[in-house]
Image: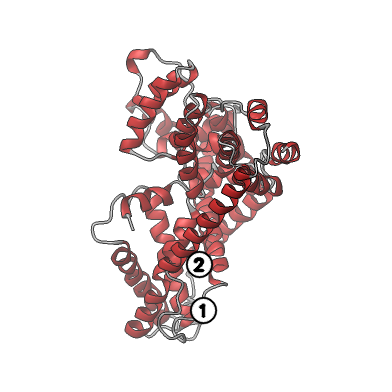
Amino acid sequence: MDSGSLIDRIRRGDNAELQKVYEMYRGEFMVWANKHFDLDFEECKEAYQLSMVQFYENVVSGKLQVFTSDPKTYIFGIGKNKIRELRELRLKQPEAGRFEAESTDERLSRESLLNKVEQALHQLGDPCQKLLELYYYKKMSLAEITLALEYKNTDTTKNLKYKCLNRLRKLFTGGN
Amino acid sequence: MEEKERDLERIEQYLNDQLSAEERTAVEHRLSEDKDFLALKEDFVALKEGIEQAGRNALRHTMDSWEKDLGNPLEEPKGEQRSLGSSLIMRWAAVFLVGVVSVVAWYFGANQSHKRLYNNYFEVYANVVLPNTRSNETLTKEEQAFLAYDNEDYERAVQLFNQILEAEQKEYVLFYSAQAHMVLNEHAEAIEHLQDVLRRQGLLVSQARWYLALCYLHTKETEKAKEQLKVLAEGDSSYSERANELLQEM
């Protein structure tokens, strides 16, 4: 696998490429996590998905531009950290579900705030939802979004982005 | 833009460190004096984080859909995983099958009106990425390429697009380079670029599929063109209606 073009393709939104990577290392990761960290199937899946999400975010944010080793070593490296975080949560909260930790009030309030934004985003619907997701999560440039969503030009896209953000804010705060 | 929208833009520029020292001081002063502006900044941070969380959850949801076809490797004997090798074999088999179908269609001379249809439907895609407003001296290579494209100097545009592609395989550069090749009647090169865009399964899938279908129409590969058009016709992109029309005319 050409790792340079792999990163480039995933960064450009190639979901098929991400799926290929997901499927390629999934089995090996789960067997490894089960053997070395005593995780069951659901926990292995949770750890693997969290690792793949982190891998994806590192690619689109530009944090990962080239592999210093190979994709497997990189993903397993993330995986080790994710498993450690999950195990720490498990130790803190032995009575809850293995990976469910009791959140502090502050954390709960932050979670609830972000859930409210997420709900407002769904309420907002497309094209605003799509535009904001492409810009803020998939880290696409205004030029790429203009082309993908067939807007007139990048200025139109930029203005629309702030209109959408303001509409989302109104839904979120329930105000003006 | 409304006042709040302009304020959101300012706050984003401030948080991304995109302001001059003077502008930065002005924003900081306003943050300390204006409670509404401060609240707007806090809202912006929450909105951005919330959008990121929504994106993350959507990705997890997509991953769950991938899980449906995969077993439990902790129970399966080794070798049950879907391998890259088998998927490559399937792809080659698909390519071979598509090739055989195309040759048969070509052999029996299915349709003689390819050129007319192509001319009726082909319209070069407008530059919506980099409208050029600056003077020629200060343009980046990408801006020069799009300026040549806007000026209908497609040979120059192709040269510049190729130089950009040597450094980075940008999806939209591949797409616009394909457009220029189509105008220059270089459909083999256009097909190569459009297939590359399509393989990425990114944001330009519908656009690439439409122009790929037109390229196949031009090269008289009718079945391949129909195959792409059927996918478009069944989808909900802005090309769906046009694809349906063209299919009927074929």
In 3D space, how far apart are the residues under numbered discs 2 and 1 (Cα atoms)?
38 Å
Q: Is residue B226 above or below residue A49?
A: above
Q: Position of residue A24 (x, y in %)?
A: 41, 68
Q: Residue at horizontal 47%, vertical 59%?
A: B92
Report which residue position mark 2 lands on: A105
Residue A100's tag is: none
Observer-side mark, 2 or 1, equals 1
In this view of the protein, can residue B31 be seen by the observer? no
Q: Give the x, y percent position of residue B78.
A: 40, 83
Q: Chain of mark 1?
A: B
| Residue A176 to residue A28: above or below | above
- In percent of the image, x 48 and y 24: which residue is there? B184
Q: Is residue A158 left or right of residue A76?
A: right
The amino acid beneath tag 2 is Asp
Mark 2 and mark 1, same subunit?
no
Q: Residues within 10 Å of mark 2 (few under 14, many from 20)?
A: few
A79 or B6, nearer to the observer: A79
Q: Residue at x 58, y 48 (%)?
A: B102
Residue A85: % across, % down? 37, 72
Q: Residue at x 42, y 49 (%)?
A: A9
Please indicate, yes or no, whether residue A25 appears anywhere in the rendered image.
yes
Residue A127 position, x and y percent, is 64, 42
Q: Quadrant of the N terminus of chain A?
A: bottom left
Residue situated furthest front in the rendering: B108
Q: Is residue A79 left or right of residue A145?
A: left
**Crowd band around label 1 with a 10 angstrom C-alpha radius: few (<14), some (14–19), many (20+):** few
Residue occupying the far left of the picture: A68
Disc marking residue B71 = 1
* B212 or B129, nearer to the observer: B212
Q: Which chain is disc 2 placed on? A: A
Image side of residue A40 versus residue B43, left or right? left
Q: How many marks?
A: 2
